[in-house]
Image (tube, rainbow, N blue to C red):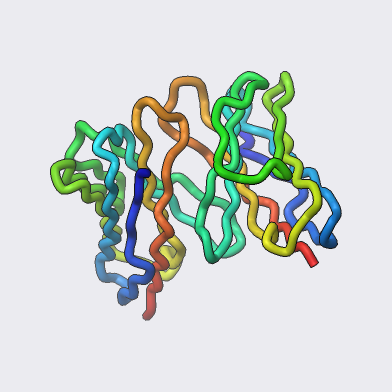
Amino acid sequence: GEDVEQSLFLSVREGDSSVINCTYTDSSSTYLYWYKQEPGAGLQLLTYIFSNMDMKQDQRLTVLLNKKDKHLSLRIADTQTGDSAIYFCAERSGGSYIPTFGRGTSLIVHP
Amino acid sequence: KAGVTQTPRYLIKTRGQQVTLSCSPISGHRSVSWYQQTPGQGLQFLFEYFSETQRNKGNFPGRFSGRQFSNSRSEMNVSTLELGDSALYLCASSPPGAAEAFFGQGTRLTVV
């Protein structure tokens, strides 16, 4: 079945850039998402990208998609302590209503 | 615009009991999905409803069931609770034809 892989942890210094990586296996993926989950909360949709796009930028967030390698990344510029959370990558094919989620990357931002 | 609302936020139940969780989607959203989140298994899809019909179902036992009402509000029910059912249950709603899904804050279920 489809699979989405992420590294479990990332630690960065406040003010640096963070890059969270994700790989997926479904070649028919149409939509790719990044969600953020803070402790005790639900998932917050940060951004998503269509598979026919290479890049999407939204303020401090930049999403890069390499469709050939099935690799998605989320770059957070000027990372702040408030960015500390778990970040989930997800993909969905056009024929499905249900996204497949990765296990999440725990981002730790230290002073 | 109000977000996805899940009630209750926290619940403690005893093994063998049953529980009902509620989800009110964003106004205008007709698709409601349910997920179970545990540290060991991550986010697992339970089921998805659209216009009162179950459109997709995940790989969970029949003890897990759901329904959707004409106003798009959804409930999920877990019968004969087991310790392993302790989890954060998340609901998400989507507008018609859109790519996005918006999640509620979740219901934290603890089975003792």
Picture quarter with the C terminus of chain A? bottom left
In the current view of this chain or complex, which residue is farthest to the left? A68
* B85 vs A50: above or below: below
Residue A111 shown left or right of residue B81 in the figure: left
Residue B62 shown left or right of residue B112 in the figure: left
Please state which of residues B35 and A40 is positioned toward the viewer in this rendering: B35
> How many numbered discs, if any?
0
Picture quarter with the N terminus of chain A? top left
Q: From the top left corner, tell me how far across and down residue B91 is, in percent.
A: 61, 42
Q: From the top left corner, tell me how far across and down residue A29 is, in percent.
A: 30, 36
- Examine the image and state in which quarter residue B20 appears: top right
Q: From the top left corner, tell me how far across and down residue A61 is, in percent.
A: 30, 51
* A70 vs A104: above or below: above
Residue at position x 41%, y 54% in the image: A88
Residue at position x 43%, y 59% in the image: A103
Residue A104 shown left or right of residue A56 in the figure: right
- Examine the image and state in which quarter residue B25 appears: top right
Residue at position x 27%, y 58% in the image: A21
Please state which of residues A36 and B107 is positioned toward the viewer in this rendering: B107
- Examine the image and state in which quarter residue B111 appears: bottom right
Q: From the top left corner, tell me how far across and down residue A80 is, in percent.
A: 38, 67
* B6 vs B27: above or below: below
Residue at position x 21%, y 46% in the image: A70
In the current view of this chain or complex, which residue is farthest to the bottom? A111
